[in-house]
């Protein structure tokens, strides 16, 4: 079947064949994953906590109608988000683990790992979703254990907004790509909303440590 072209409407998501397999999550739900392209050279693979840059198109499985197209929204900018921490639906977080830059995948996501019984905007309740994903770049994310020590410029085991903002600025400079200035602010706001549990304007090592590692 041929996928339809990108629609004109924009869905504001908090976001997004040779090898076929399944990825399991804790409650035994599954996504169906197909790797459609693997680059000849792969020097790193995506992991939880990485800041990833990707294009992804979303379809409703029932009729293949496209509800989201990153190549059309805001002049086709790919999306930056932190992988595995809930900035996108759980099915996408799962589907994009262990990807190489340049790799392409197709994933079928059940409702429980998408928008569930409530749905969202153009997505009806209990909808099975299909995403076509192309990973463009991987950076050490602002939530990895290694990055904490880079961000914590004064080594006080607390991260301020200024420290995290500086880190994001430096990371974005590395790829030299132009992007919507609002991306920086959205990521910064999201980090504090999800991690500053006591709302004191600082993220402690304990609050930041989504991995529960002993390094922090």
Image (spheres, rainbow, N blue to C red):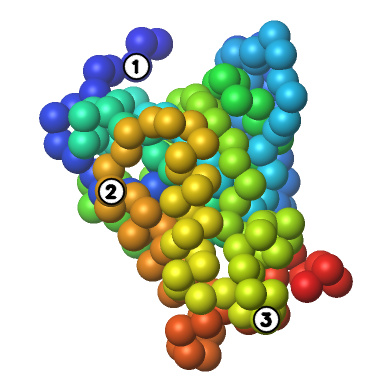
- Residue at the farthest right position: 214
Dot 1 or dot 2, earlier in sequence: 1
Asked if residue 199 lies left or right of residue 185, the reply is right
Of 163 and 131, nearer the camera is 163
The crowd level at tag 2 (other Cα within 10 Å; few <14, some 14-19, many 20+) is: few
Q: Decide if residue 32 is in sight here.
A: yes
Q: Position of residue 71 (x, y in %)?
A: 30, 26
Q: CA distance from mark 1 to mark 2?
A: 31 Å
Measured along the vertical axis of the image, is residue 193 above or below residue 168? below
Q: CA distance from mark 2 to mark 3?
A: 29 Å
Of 96 and 203, nearer the camera is 203
Circle 2 sits on which residue?
Answer: 181
Q: Secondary structure at mark 1?
A: loop
| Figure quadrant of the C terminus | bottom right
Q: Secondary structure at mark 3?
A: loop
The crowd level at tag 1 (other Cα within 10 Å; few <14, some 14-19, many 20+) is: few
Q: Position of residue 47 (x, y in %)?
A: 69, 44
Is the Cβ of the residue at disc 1 closer than 8 Å to that at disc 2?
no
What's the residue at 47%, 59% (across, down)?
Answer: 166
Measured along the vertical axis of the image, is residue 167 above or below residue 162? above
Asked if residue 200 lies left or right of residue 75, the reply is right
Dot 2 or dot 3, earlier in sequence: 3
What's the residue at 65%, 13% (across, down)?
Answer: 39
Circle 3 sits on which residue?
Answer: 156
The crowd level at tag 3 (other Cα within 10 Å; few <14, some 14-19, many 20+) is: few
Of 213 and 113, nearer the camera is 213
Asked if residue 197 lies left or right of residue 23, the reply is left
| Figure quadrant of the N terminus | top left
Circle 1 sits on which residue?
Answer: 3
What's the residue at 65%, 30% (across, down)?
Answer: 99
Q: Nearer the viewer, mark 1 or mark 2?
A: 2
């Amino acid at each position: 079947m041929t996928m339809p072209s990108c629609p004109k409407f924009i869905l504001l998501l908090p976001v997004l064949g040779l090898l076929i397999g399944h990825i399991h999550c804790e409650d035994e739900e599954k996504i169906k994953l197909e790797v459609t392209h693997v680059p000849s050279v792969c020097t790193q693979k995506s992991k939880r906590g990485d800041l990833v840059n990707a294009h992804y198109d979303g379809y409703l499985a029932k009729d293949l109608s496209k509800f989201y197209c990153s190549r059309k929204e805001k002049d086709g900018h790919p999306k930056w988000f932190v992988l595995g921490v809930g900035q996108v639906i759980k099915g996408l977080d799962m589907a994009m683990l262990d990807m190489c830059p340049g790799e392409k995948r197709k994933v079928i996501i059940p409702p429980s790992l998408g928008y569930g019984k409530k749905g969202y905007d153009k997505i009806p309740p209990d909808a099975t979703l299909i995403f076509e994903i192309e990973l463009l770049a991987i950076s050490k994310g602002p939530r990895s254990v290694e990055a904490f020590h880079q961000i914590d410029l004064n080594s006080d085991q607390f991260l301020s907004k200024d420290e995290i903002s500086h880190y994001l600025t430096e990371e974005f400079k590395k790829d030299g790509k132009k992007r919507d200035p609002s991306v920086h602010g959205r990521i910064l706001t999201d980090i504090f909303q999800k991690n500053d549990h006591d709302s004191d304007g600082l993220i402690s090592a304990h609050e930041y440590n989504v991995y529960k590692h002993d390094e922090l």
